Image (cartoon, grey):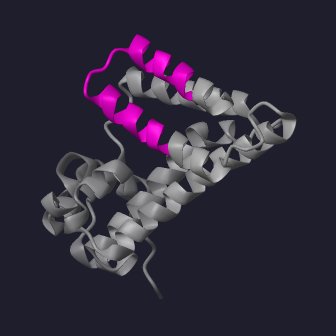
Amino acid sequence: MPRSKEYDHQDVLDAATSQFLDKGYKGVSVNDLVKATKLNKHSMYQEFGNKEGLFCACIDNYVQTVYRSFGHILRRHPLGLTNIDDFFRHRIDYAYSGKGNGCLLLTTVAEKEQVDKVVLDRVQHHWTLQKADFKLCLDAARERGDIPEHKDTDILSNHLFCQLIGMVIMIKGGTDRQTVEMMIDMILAHVRQ
């Protein structure tokens, strides 16, 4: 008869994610993960395959957790620029709250030479989904005449995504909130022109 799992899957992912955020993929050893998750090596390998498998599971869990928190904002009906504005403001509220300890996706890309292509592909997949949500709002705004018809919503969604990443980095670097809020106003003014 197979033994039942004696650990909480979510607790394991949370503990491992914390290690990857603190030390980066390369900086975390299997022994660090075993200690942090309280799994033995056998259980870790059986559940996740290897360190990379655990890391990929952490990325997926991280994205699902973050999207539960704010992903719905972009998909609210009616779709449009209000959703994008609310989304950006929610993200800066979160960033300034001090609740988060970094972005696992940005941390992963920052050390891209240390991770395999499968990991980077997973990050790109999640980023593609984020940009698709921006595009849905932009397409709806263009259909209503809130942005000019000639605007390319694919390019604009990439632009918004780049602005989002830049703002997260600026906040992490100590940029004051008023500056970031003025940036959001400028970003949306650019989209409307």
Q: Residue 37 in the image: x percent, y percent? A: 28, 58
Q: Position of residue 136 (x, y in %)?
A: 72, 48
Q: Residue furthest front?
A: 150
Q: Residue at x 32, y 29 (%)?
A: 170
Total number of numbered discs in the rendering: 0
Determine the main secondary structure of the stretch shown in magenta: helix
Depth check: 95 or 155 in front? Answer: 155
Residue 5 against residue 145 in the figure, above or below: below
User: What residue is drawn where x is 25% and y is 63%?
Assistant: 112
Q: Position of residue 181 (x, y in %)?
A: 48, 17
Region in magenta:
161-187
The quadrant the C terminus occupies is top right
Q: Nearer the viewer, residue 163 or 57?
A: 163
Frontmost residue, 70 versus 8: 70
Residue 98 image-quadrant placement:
top left
Q: Is residue 176 left or right of residue 164?
A: left
Nearest the viewer among 55 and 4 is 55
- 22 left or right of 149 in image: left
- Is 92 placed above or below 149 here? above
Residue 32 visible to the viewer: yes
From the viewer's perspective, is residue 170 above or below residue 45? Answer: above
- Residue 79 location (% of width, % of height): 78, 38
Which residue is farthest right? 144
Residue 16: name its quadrant. Answer: bottom left
Q: In percent of the image, x 83 and y 35: which residue is there? A: 78
- Verify whether residue 15 appears in magenta: no
Specify whether residue 100 is in view: no
